[in-house]
Amino acid sequence: MPSMTVTLAVAPEPRFSIPDRLGGCARSGGQAVVSGRWNAVPMDELMRQRRVYGADHDDPDPGPKPGHDYRELVGGPLDGLLLDVTGWTDAALCEGAALITEIGAYGPGGRAEYRSRQADPLKWDWCGDTR
C-alpha cells in the first residue's frame, strides 16, 4: 500500500515530542527532530491511530471517547478502525453491521460487512462488501 508523506513548516525550536493518542510518541525513539521541517509520519499511519469509524476527518480528536464501548474492525476497507457500539443491544452486537464506505468494492454508497469474531467478540471480522 503506498504511503503519503506530509512535510510541515514549524517554529525554529530544536526538538519537541509528538504525543499520539495512545500516550506514546508518533515516531519511534520518543522524539521527532526538527531542523526547519518536521520529519513526518506517513499520512495513512496517522489516519489509522485508533480512529473511530464515522469521525469527521477534520475532528482534532477522532479517537475513542471515555465511557464508550468499541469493537475493532479487522480486515477489509475499514481495517484497524474502531466502531462505537455504545448502547447497542445484544441482538445487534450478534448481528454485526454493514458500514457505509467509499473505499470498498462498490465505491461511494457501498457497504463493508463486519461480524463478531467468536473467539474474541471485541474484534469484528470483515465478511465482504455489498451495495
Image (cartoon, grey):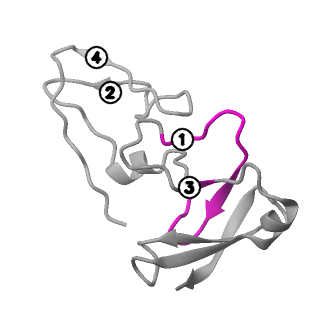
Find numbered disc 2 in the image and state the secondary structure of the residue it sits on. Answer: strand
Judge whether residue 30 is colored magenta: no
N-terminal of the two: label 2 or label 3? 2
Give the residue at mark 1. 63
For residue 32, the mark is 2
Where, quadrant-wise, is the N terminus in this rendering?
A: bottom left
Residue position for label 4: 15
Give yes or no for residue 64 being in the magenta stretch: yes
Rounded to the nearest angstrom, the CA distance separating label 3 from label 1 is 9 Å
The three-letter code of the residue at mark 3 reads Leu
Circle 3: element type: loop
Question: Going 86% across and 61% down the picture, which residue do you hit?
Answer: 90
**Nearer the observer, disc 2 or disc 3?**
3
Distance of label 2 from label 3 (alpha carbons): 25 Å
Residue drawn at x 85%, y 64% is: 119
Three-letter residue code for mark 4: Arg
Q: Residues within 10 Å of mark 1 (few under 14, many from 20)?
A: some
Q: What stretch is highlighted in magenta?
A: 62-83
Is 9 displayed left or right of 53 in the figure? left
The answer to the question of whether label 2 and label 4 lie on touching residues, with beta carbons closer than 8 A, is yes
Is the magenta region chiefly helix, strand or loop? loop
The amino acid sitting under disc 1 is: Gly
Provide residue 74's location: percent of width, then percent of height. 63, 64
- Disc with the residue nearer the chain's start (2 vs 4): 4
The residue where tag 3 is placed is: 81
Q: Residue 91: x and y, percent?
A: 85, 67
Q: Looking at the image, is mark 3 or mark 4 earlier in the sequence? A: 4
Q: Which residue is drawn at 71% across and 54% down?
A: 85
Q: In this view, does 45 lie to the left or right of 36?
A: right
